[in-house]
Amino acid sequence: MANVVIVGAQWGDEGKGKVVDIYTEFASDVVRYQGGNNAGHTLVVGEEKTILHLIPSGVLHERKRCIIGNGVVLDPKVFFQEIANLKKKGYLKDDRQLVVDGNVHVIMPYHKAIDIARENRSDSRRIGTTGRGIGPTYEDKIGRRGIRLHDLVRPEVFAAKLKEFLPEKNFLLEKFLGASPLAEEAILKEYSAYGREMKKYLGNASILLNESFRAGRHVLFEGAQGSLLDVDHGTYPYVTSSSTIAGGACTGTGIGPQHINEVIGISKAYVTRVGEGPFPTELHDEMGERLRQAGQEFGSTTGRPRRTGWFDAVALREAVRINGMTGLAITKLDVLNELETIRICTAYSYRGDLLETYPQDLEILKECKPVYEELEGWRTDISGAKSMEDLPEAASDYLRKLEQVTGCPVVLVSVGARRDQTLQVKNPFAAA
C-alpha cells in the first residue's frame, strides 16, 4: 500500500490536475481535501480539454472512487453543473463513483455577495480573490455559523439556520458594504432543491479512507492552490482561506499522518501567480509576456492573466520543508524551449544581506530582490520526448540544477499538455 499527497509547490496553477490524472492510474481512491471552486484543474485527454473546479481529477478514469473531503467548501450550483458537464462527455456513468463528506461546508449566495462587495470597496485592501465566496464560507466555518451538507439535506434544519444567519449577512451587505440584501425565500427554494439532490452523494470520507487503508488499496490526495497560498504558511494576507499543504490532507479528510507515504510537489519550470501579493522574481518586461503567451498563463477559473517570473528556489525550498516533500514534478518545461538563457533565483538580497531562506515577515519579503544564476537554454522543441534520455543536455542540466537548489529529487517532467507528454522518473506509488 502507498498513499500519495499532491500539493502545489508555488502559488497555485502549477499543473496539479494533469499530474493527479496520471497518478490516478495507480490509485483506487482520489481525494480532494481543501479549497473550493476557486481552484481550476485543466486536463487534456487526447485533444479533449476538461476543466474541473470541485470534483477530483480522477473522475476521468472508470472504476476510481472520487471523494470530496470535509475540508472542502462546496457551491452546490457549481457542483451539479460540473456533474452535468462530465456526464455529457461520457464520464461519471455511475454516481457511486463520487462521494461527498457530509461535514463539507456549503457556499451560500451571501458568501459570494460579501466576497465581491468587499473586493469592490474602494477603501479596502484588495486581496485578489476570485469572488467565489470561499473566504467568507471558511470564516463562518471557523466562527461556527456555517451550514454543512448534513444541514442542507434536512429541510427543517436548513430553513432554521438560514433564518438565523441571513439577517446578519443582509445587515453587513446593506449597511456596511453598500450592496443589495438577499431574499430568504428564493435562497430557501433553490438550496432546498440542491439538498434533495445531494443526498445520494453523501458519505463519511474518514471511514471510507480508513477502510481502503486496511484493505491495502492506494489512495491519492489532491490539493488545490499552492503552498505559498496556505493560510498559515503563505504570504498572508494574500493567501487562500484553507490549509493547502500536505498536513491539510489529514484534517481535511479525517485520516492520521501515518497513512501518508509520499508527498509530491508540483512546480512549473518557471513561476506564476494570480492575484495580489509579493512576487520576488516577477518579470514586468517582454520576457514576462513571452512566458505568459508561451505558457498560456490565463486562469482556468477566472481567465485572469497570470503574473510570470523566473523559477524561485528560495520559495521552493520553503515549500519542500513545510510539506515534507519527497519528490518534485516539473511541469511546462517545454515553455522554455526557445529561450537562449534561463535564470534561477537561488537567494534574495535584502538591504545588503543575502537571504537563502524564505522570510516570514511580509514587509521583508516585499523588499527582497532576486539573486540569479544563469543557465544555457536548449533552443529546441522537447514536446516529443518519450523519456528523460530524449531531452537535450541543456534541459537535463536545468533539471539537475533544480534538484540541487531545492534539495528535492525530480520524479516527473511534463513536456506538453497531453497525458502522453509526461516523463516519469520514479513512480511514488512504488516507493513505499
Image (cartoon, helix red, strand yellow):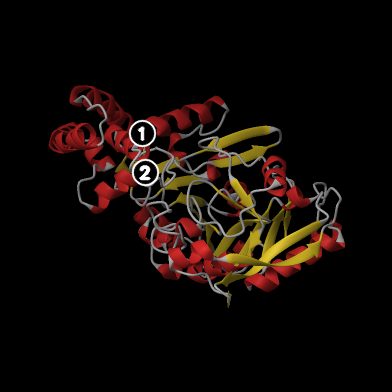
Q: Residue at x 38, y 30 (%)?
A: 77
Residue 236 screen position, x and y as percent: 41, 58
Indicate the secondary structure of the residue bearing disc 1.
helix
**Residue 368 screen position, x and y as percent:** 55, 66
Pointer 2 and pointer 1: residues touching (CB < 8 Å)? Answer: no
- Above or below for 317 versus 335: below
Q: How busy is the neighbourhood of tag 2: few (under 14 within 10 Å), some, or many (20 plus)?
A: many
- Judge from the rendering whether residue 356 lies leftward or rightward of residue 253; answer left or right: right
Q: Where the C terminus falls, by quadrant? A: bottom right
Which residue of the protein is positioned furthest toward the front in this rendering? 351
Question: Of the residues tagged 2 and 1, which is closer to the observer?
Answer: 2
Residue placed most toward the observer, 406 or 384: 406
Kindly identify the residue that appears in the image at 56 percent across and 48 percent down.
13
Q: To which quarter of the image does residue 271 belong?
A: bottom right
Whole-percent x, y for residue 173 in the image: 23, 34
For marks 2 and 1, give the CA distance: 13 Å
x and y percent of residue 405 in the render? 67, 72
From this viewpoint, is residue 308 visible? yes
Q: Disc 2 marks which residue?
A: 134
Closer to the camera in the image, 332 or 355 = 355
In the image, 133 versus 306, the foreground residue is 306
The residue depicted at 48 percent of the width and 50 percent of the height is: 224
Q: Amino acid at mark 1?
A: Pro
Q: Is residue 218 visible?
A: no
Residue labelled with disc 1: 76
Q: Give the secondary structure at mark 2.
A: helix
Q: Earlier in the sequence, mark 2 or mark 1?
A: 1
